Amino acid sequence: MNTTRHWPKRAFILSRALSRAFSDTPSPTFPLKHVTRSNFDSALVELRSHVRAADFVAIDMEMTGVTSAPWRESFEFDRFDIRYLKVKDSAEKFAVLQFGVCPFRWDSLKQSFIAHPHNFFVFARQEIPLDRTSYEFLCQTTSMDFLAKYQFDFNACIHEGISYLSRGQEDEARKRLISPKGDQLMHPSYNLRETTDLSLVRVADVLFTERMKKRLGEWRDDLLQNRVGGPQEEKVPDDLNQQFRTVFFKMRPALSLDGFTSHQLSLIRMVTRKHFKDLTYVCFNGESTSEELVVYTDSESDKARLMEEVKNDHQRRAEMKINAAVGFRHVIDLLSSENKLIVGHNCILDIAHVHSKFLAPLPSTAEEFVSCVNKYFPSIIDTKILLNADYTLQRKMKRSSTSLSSAFSLLCPEIAHGFTHNVLSYEPCVKVEVHVDEMRSSNWNSGAKHEAGYDAFMTGCVFAQACSHLGIDFQLHSPSENLTQNEKLQKHMNLLYLSWINGDIIDLRTGNRSAELSGSNMIRKPYRKILFKNIVLLWGFPSKLKPSMIRDCICKTLGPTSVISTYCIDQTAVFVQFSKAELVSDFLNLKETLEQSNDAISHLHPLSQLLEGGNTRAASYETYKEICASPISKVLFADQAEAVGIKWKTELLPSDKEESHDNTRSHLESAMDSPQAVEKSKTRNTEDVVNDSSNKRFCDDIIDSFLKVEKIRRTTNL
Amino acid sequence: MVALIRRRFFGTKISPNSHRHKLQWRVKQVTKSNFSDSLQEFKSHLSASDFVAVSLQNTGSFSAPWNRVSSFDSPETAYLKVRRAAERFQLLQFAICPFTISGSKVTAHPYNFHLFPRDELNIGMPSYSFSCQTSYLTAMARQGFDFNACIYDGISYLSRAQELAAKVRMANPISLNHVVEASSSPPTVADTVFVERVKSRIKHWKKSCTDSTSKKIDDALVKSLQKLVLGGEQYGSRPCMTIDVCSERQVQLVSEMLREFFDDLVALKIPTKGGGTQAVRVVLTSSKEDKSLLERELQNAEEEQNKKMRGFREVIELVSASQKPVVSHNTLNDFSVIHSKFIAPLPLDVNEFLNSLQSIFPHIFDVNHMMKGIGPLENVTSIPAAVSYLKNRFFAPIEMELSQGALLDESKIHGQTVVRICYLFAKLCSVLKITPGSIQSSDGKVLDGYANAFRSCSGNSEESLDGGIRIWTNSPRKVDCKDLVFLWGFRNRLSAGMLKSLLQGSHDVFSEEFDVCLVDKSCAILVFFHPNLSQAFLDVMNSVEISGSLRELVSEGLRAADYDTYKRACSLGLWETDLASSLDKASATPDRLSQSDPETKPAEIYWCNDLIINLDDL
């Protein structure tokens, strides 16, 4: 095998270096438990007992990517429902490569936690034929590169990763097994071909059939003779006899057919059925090979018995195959059925992956998602929520970043750096002893960051330490007492960041969402209220336009205070937040009017700069949601909108037409202040120019060149 | 007894492997670390060879069963399917083999380049993300593919189009000498004013620079003050000045002015991030020699940058520049990938694609298509099958000589296919009595019949079947696309035969000969062998007078659409999992295609009763 395994070397070198640097007594270091196809069954048995005994189970995973397009990243301007759509898109498109599971158990004798970090390599293969499922996944180039930087072992994953079936897929497979049609598929001896006789058109076929008839007859006659006359010397096998070998199948004499083409086999099958009442054609599927046999049966009832036996065999085999194909999902089922406290770090995406890969396709709304998750995993704690919500923890963290690795090194310095003493902290750290197979270590550090199993271990350590800071004394707890019932944890239980960017939290029990709790992270900018109904989405505008220019452009038209803010989605799209909701429809109507009319005035309107090229689209915030909900992912937002099938240029909001038309007129007039408009409109409407006396003295030439320079400056600068 | 059975099973397990004694050729494996060395070697091998064979390893080819090119596809739809795959999946290995045929001897130099679309320049290119088909990855794993080597050390690249975009994005200064062309319009007053002002500024600045250097002011303060006053900066060790410009016109004026008056100044264009020009930077050199030195420096820096950006594409550029004939096994697939990854995004129109490709690779040979010249072997699609077919029927010994030697080495086995393509091509040339030497001399006229014939399943081959043996009991029939009707909305898991018998008595149109075949489990294709019946059938399906069992079927959800609807589904990119839902969507959208394209060419496909979907793509 060509698989190169990087993990032991990396872990070994790193941990060796660390242990040498920080601890006097060399601690035994060893890699975490890597689980692949080959050791999955035994690992699962062990994990079952570990999880059953655990107080909580920390999880983490590595995926092939996070966002399927740059504009799918998390934005400040994302509404609650959009955030869920983005999480959903990510979980649906990318694959999980590694799944870290680390059960933690409090050992009251040792006064320490016992952790069993497991690192599962996961790779969804098509192990049993199921139609419809496409088995395709997306890779984000930067994510793959990131994993490569941390020496992720892709070979182990693709060559040796554990496959899985979701609940839905398993149900489908079982359904096919019991349905009559599925029976046919699993049981080739009932193949359709059998019911329709092959018409013997070719001479070769006719001759072959005759020969087979003779041979089978001879064999059967021999058999009957032998039965009467006892064992006899076998004939010298010639070339043809290699193809027929007498074996025993289910305690009956049988002829094994070897080296025939499928066409020949179907001819033999036909001959058997047509001419021999006491012979049965059986296709027997072994572990990896399938075998074609002609079996001798004593009587009709014996034949029926044989068929029944074969059928049962097939059934059992298929059953086992499905069970094996469920693969890694057994781990998820285990976590769900044991009702343990699940601990993750900023884990909404992880949970969404679990839902979409192992439970069911993700529902379209966050509320449905949440209620389903809550059903399968009634208690989940997010350490990121915990760290940001509690003041004492905030102080402990010295208000630094709450990323997993920094939380780990701040809260668990003993484990992270191997310090055996910590001068700064008054209370001792929670001890964690790591068990991997036969090996044990009380200051274990594999150092393999971004290895899911190790990240899960770090998450668990952070959680244990945070609990102790919250005043949960593990020593007082009897092993039977459940952490999920702990009142100090209750207010943090089942809360997840739907988006970390602006602290939107969703409650898994109720589906309610809330802004971050009071006493939250101080470094965060004060929450800016965004009014989504005041927002216009713009895309397809000339690429040279920057958001600030778009803002200027609109301000010139709708007034200097009309635009509160602009937000860049990508280079092709921008959000514009207006000060009033009416301005949204005003803007959309104005744009529509300008595009409809083709006269000089619309060309000179300040907005014309924005509409240049004729591809500028504008819509309300709801269209953004529609675009985000699409399964398509083009790299650029403008291409995405086109792919989603948006053909209109401006999405007009249902509003009073008369009024909006008036508005448009007044805006057009107010736009006359800009020099271009004034200058060119002179020819059309002399009154305006007369009123504006300041422009009179310009001769046409000067204005011309001025305009040119002005325009050039605007297009090239910035 | 049990023991006997056990032994028996054990025996069967070994047997399939016993006859797998394939010849393994050593192929040079190229990754990031040995790329530049290998490139030089490849260059010399390429120039010494007559042909180049290519073979590609992608991460997938189709997302749904109906997405693969099949026999009912017209060239347009086949291209659209291939286009989608090329855009969606990633190329991980590019095996390329320059080779020469002399008599029965083939001299080949196989290389296998490992690619990964790493974002080397941090600009989101060449690819933000890509799809992988699990079955492709597992098949690659079975062949011992090293994914770590590929992702850690794969060579990156940018397409021609991406390189242009990247240059704009990175906004590196460009030497002005390359970009100047003669002014088109006479200078206006404003132009003259601008030129005069810039000229005097430059004169002043130059004078002060040369003055100060002659005076040798060492005082740092004075120097920096001078810098402030004069607006002068340093470019490396040389003084320089930036002239702000507002338009390309002004860039032109500045460069013309500089050319007229100075021979010790080097001008650089400073682009904006958006692609325009922000300023012209003028660098003062001390002498003519110094000037040429600087120019060389700039050129080298640019070349270095270009090389870094192109990455693997350098190989493609070399092949394209050599104008050598390129041989491939599945040209439509391979060259759509090559075009999309290394040239530019694929156009929507197949002819536009072919034109663009023609300009880059003038001679392309498809061994699959050449096989058709020997016999109607449309089902001999895999290379080993083709090789054994030829071996059994023709005496055409081919001797392979490889630059790397023909040693069996476990780690060097990737990219074998490309050598097999060379071998197959040489054998075909010999069987078809084509002397490869004549290809060069007569500019490919001899092989013209085979060159650039893209094997889409519509197959424009009209070759006579002489000499070949008919493998098909059912020979393919030529069918006009107009006579095809897509049917969906029937009961799940209905076989083609059952559907046919259901339709048989349902209406008069089915009294004539017709055939049914399943495209995927949701959709069937209906072919009428008599003209105009398809239209009649579609009319019936849409009329209120529909009656009998057909009415019953329609009430149960049966729907029908013509071939144009299918085309529309492909061109609108409605690649749903089931063809039925794609057709549903396509029939819901108004027919824009036929309006824009009134001259709908009558397309034809070959219909064979055994619509076998080729499963040995892997």
Image (spheres, rainbow, N blue to C red):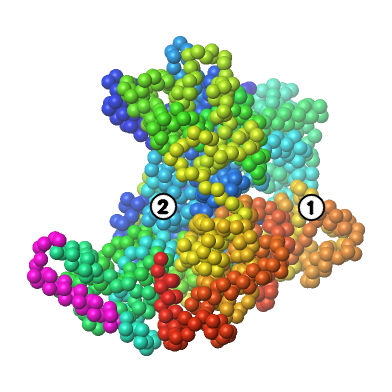
Q: CB atoms at circles 2 and 1 under 8 Å apart?
A: no
Mark 1 highlights which residue?
B490
Q: Position of residue A240 (x, y in %)?
A: 62, 40
Q: Assign the magenta stretch its main secondary structure.
A: helix
3D distance between C-alphas at marks 2 and 1:
46 Å
Magenta residues span B195-221
- A169 sits left or right of A67 in the view: right
Q: Residue B284 or B475: which is nearer the viewer?
A: B284
- Quadrant (top left/top right/bottom left/bottom right) for the C terminus of chain A: bottom left
> Residue drawn at (59%, 28%), measured in percent from left and top?
A379
Q: Is residue A487 visible?
A: yes
> Residue drawn at (53%, 38%), measured in percent from left and top?
A516
Q: Upstream in the sequence, badge 2 or badge 1? A: 2
> Residue drawn at (25%, 80%), measured in percent from left and top?
B199
Q: Position of residue A337 (x, y in %)?
A: 63, 25
Q: Residue B427 or A181: which is nearer the viewer?
A: A181
Q: Position of residue A492 (x, y in %)?
A: 55, 29
- Mark 2 belongs to which amino acid? Arg
**Badge 1: chain ID:** B
Label 1 crowd bin: few (<14), some (14–19), many (20+), radius 10 Å: some
Residue B15 covered by magenta stretch: no
Asked if residue A230 is positioned above or below residue A557 in the image, the reply reads above
Label 2 crowd bin: few (<14), some (14–19), many (20+), radius 10 Å: many
Q: Secondary structure at mark 1?
A: loop
Q: Residue A428 or B276: which is nearer the viewer?
A: A428
Tell me the number on the disc at residue B118: 2
- Quadrant (top left/top right/bottom left/bottom right) for the N terminus of chain A: top left
- A614 sits left or right of B594 in the view: left
Q: Residue A314 or A88: which is nearer the viewer?
A: A88
